[in-house]
């Protein structure tokens, strides 16, 4: 299929707009379709996608790339399914006007157009590591940012967990499913000699019987039986099926979930053996990883969003999409490394992005990184009122001014163990804040120097007007994960795998910046403007 750009639209004599009344035309041009046509459709860079198609010009041309990307953006914007999108494009003048297809007798889209386009993008990313949809987003977002007159010099950043469209599996169900998938693959090829004694694994009801209903057999026994069957099958199937996905996933699951005992017998791993968070969660999505954050378990991916902010509002300008085991620290490190402009910029983020190495690398690229939050538990502010000796290794007085009975520095934990007379602490108004432990004659506590420093920083931030403004700026980025979840359903994407899920996420980000652009053009932008000294 040859690549051809769709840079212009030849208006035909029978263009649909020619048959609309003046009133309908005015309504059409006041709708979102006009904004999309002017600032989104015409700014989609089709040339980015040229590598997906043949360089030969004598073959059938591709479907217009800007129409495909534009239609996918409108699909997310309108909350339509792909079937509904095709019908809407055929009958809704607004969609045709937005996509510059009012002169087409038939819309240049079919029920396979989108899936084939995503397939080409996915194959290209696997080979080259380049996400073309992401590149398209970055260019389009920059054009919209310039139109909204938002400076790129102040950006804010936040990350979010994105759930994979998979079910949580226990160890028994995971190993059984991987083994069953390989047995079914072998059975479908007619190689039943390889699976003698394992025929029940391709029976429809066998899974529920073994995983859920066989309660009279201990789970450990059922699990060991599945492991033994898998260990027996893998060597026999390696020659014919070693390159198949089913074989590789069973081999991976077995290596991650089992070990050899003293008798060289393969048995399940125990908690003491430990298992990495990158282990297989579900064979339906081998890329999904496990992470526990804020007391919740997540199986899937993580996205990091960078948003430019100014007096005229805010607009996401970039995003990163990866497995959820990736840290915020590595996300901002990648952003810093990619910066090419010498112009000074400021990144505002929470404490998870902080670090001395980040500050050093950012300074080399003329970037200021301001973190507005502290990691971990909120420190006790009372710790800042304990006075230290000149060398910082001993406490010389408590918040009430009492000198300690004894004070000793603990190097291993970078903390100070201090004791006071019991009568000094027993009636002290700060007893509950200090959390000193009362003994028969004395009271004692351990003061972490790291926690004390955090308490001082927290107090300084509260009294710093600039940091208060910066904190308000950063808090605005928290709305993006909320919008992506509530309106764009990023935790319920109908695909699996990092590459495919990333494609859907990228289109949703396209739709998000169009929504912000639309509110801006309609004068409904509600982002609070920045103060003159910051903007």
Image (cartoon, rainbow, N blue to C red):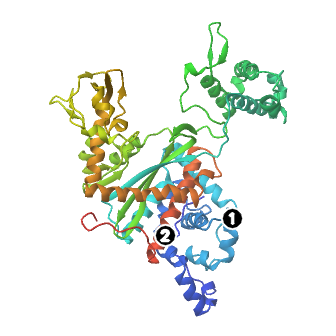
Q: Give the camera-side residue of 243 and 217.
A: 217
Q: Quadrant of residue 438?
A: top left
Q: Give the camera-side residue of 72 and 280.
A: 280
Q: SS class of the residue under badge 1?
A: loop
Q: Is residue 40 left or right of residue 113?
A: left
Q: Are marks 1 and 2 in contact (CB under 8 Å)?
A: no
Q: Give the camera-side residue of 213 and 33.
A: 213
Does the image show residue 323? Answer: yes
Q: Residue furthest top?
A: 263
Q: SS class of the residue under badge 2?
A: loop
Residue at mark 2? 40
Other residues around mark 2 within 10 Å, as few (<14) / some (14–19) / many (≥20):
many
Labels 1, 2: front one? 2
Q: CA distance from mark 1 to mark 2?
A: 22 Å
- Name which residue lies at 38% across and 71% down: 148
Sequence-wise first label, 1 or 2: 2
Q: Is residue 82 above or below residue 497?
A: below
Q: Position of residue 445 (x, y in %)?
A: 33, 27
- Name which residue lies at 44% across and 72% down: 525
Q: Is residue 469 left or right of residue 168?
A: left
Q: Is residue 287 above or below residue 483?
A: above
Q: Position of residue 417 (x, y in %)?
A: 29, 24
Residue 348 marker: none
Q: Is residue 320 above or below residue 270?
A: below
Q: Is residue 148 left or right of residue 362?
A: right
Residue 110 marker: 1
Q: Position of residue 296 (x, y in %)?
A: 55, 41
């Amino acid at each position: 299929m040859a690549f051809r750009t769709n840079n212009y639209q030849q208006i035909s004599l029978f263009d649909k707009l020619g048959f609309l009344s003046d009133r309908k035309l005015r309504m059409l041009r006041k709708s979102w379709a006009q904004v999309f046509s002017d600032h989104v459709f015409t700014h989609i860079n089709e040339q980015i996608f040229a590598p997906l198609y043949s360089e030969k010009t004598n073959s059938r041309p591709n479907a217009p790339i800007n129409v495909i990307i534009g239609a996918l953006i409108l699909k997310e914007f309108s909350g339509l399914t792909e079937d509904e999108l095709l019908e809407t494009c055929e009958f809704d003048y607004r969609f045709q006007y937005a996509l510059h297809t009012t002169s087409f007798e038939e819309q240049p889209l079919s029920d396979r157009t989108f899936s084939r386009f995503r397939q080409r993008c996915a194959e290209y990313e696997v080979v080259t590591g380049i996400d073309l949809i992401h590149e398209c987003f970055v260019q389009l977002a920059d054009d919209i940012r310039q139109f909204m007159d938002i400076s790129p010099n102040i950006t804010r950043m936040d990350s979010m967990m994105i759930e994979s469209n998979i079910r949580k599996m226990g160890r028994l169900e995971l190993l059984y499913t991987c083994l069953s998938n390989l047995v079914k693959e072998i059975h479908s090829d007619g190689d039943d000699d390889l699976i003698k004694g394992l025929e029940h694994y391709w029976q429809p009801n066998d899974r529920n019987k073994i995983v859920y209903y066989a309660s009279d057999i201990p789970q450990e026994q059922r699990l060991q039986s599945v492991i033994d069957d898998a260990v027996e099958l893998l060597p026999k199937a390696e020659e014919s099926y070693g390159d198949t996905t089913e074989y590789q996933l069973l081999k991976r699951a077995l290596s991650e979930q089992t070990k050899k005992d003293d008798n060289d017998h393969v048995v399940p791993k125990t908690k003491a053996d430990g298992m990495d968070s990158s282990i297989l969660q579900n064979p339906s999505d081998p890329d999904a990883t496990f992470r526990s954050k804020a007391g919740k378990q997540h199986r899937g991916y993580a996205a990091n969003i960078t948003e430019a902010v100014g007096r005229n509002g805010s607009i996401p300008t970039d995003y990163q999409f990866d497995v959820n085991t990736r840290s915020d620290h590595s996300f901002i490190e990648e952003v810093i490394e990619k910066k090419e402009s010498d112009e000074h910029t400021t990144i505002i983020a929470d404490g998870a992005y902080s670090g001395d190495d980040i500050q050093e690398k950012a300074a080399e690229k003329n970037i200021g990184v301001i973190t507005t939050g502290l990691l971990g538990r909120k420190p006790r502010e009372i710790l800042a009122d304990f006075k230290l000796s000149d060398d910082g290794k001993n406490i010389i007085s408590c918040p009430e001014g009492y000198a300690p009975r004894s004070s000793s520095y603990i190097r291993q934990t970078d903390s100070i163990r201090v004791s006071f007379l019991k009568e000094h602490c027993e009636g002290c108004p700060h007893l509950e804040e200090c959390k000193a432990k009362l003994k028969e004659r004395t009271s004692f506590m351990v003061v972490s120097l790291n926690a004390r420093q955090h308490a001082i920083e927290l107090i300084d931030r509260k009294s710093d007007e600039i940091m208060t403004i910066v904190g308000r700026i950063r808090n605005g980025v928290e709305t993006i994960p909320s919008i992506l979840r509530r309106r764009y359903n990023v935790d319920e994407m109908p695909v699996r795998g990092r590459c495919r899920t990333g494609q859907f996420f990228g289109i949703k980000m396209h739709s998000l910046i169009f929504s912000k652009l639309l509110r801006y053009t309609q004068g409904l932008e509600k982002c609070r403007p920045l103060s003159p000294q910051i903007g």
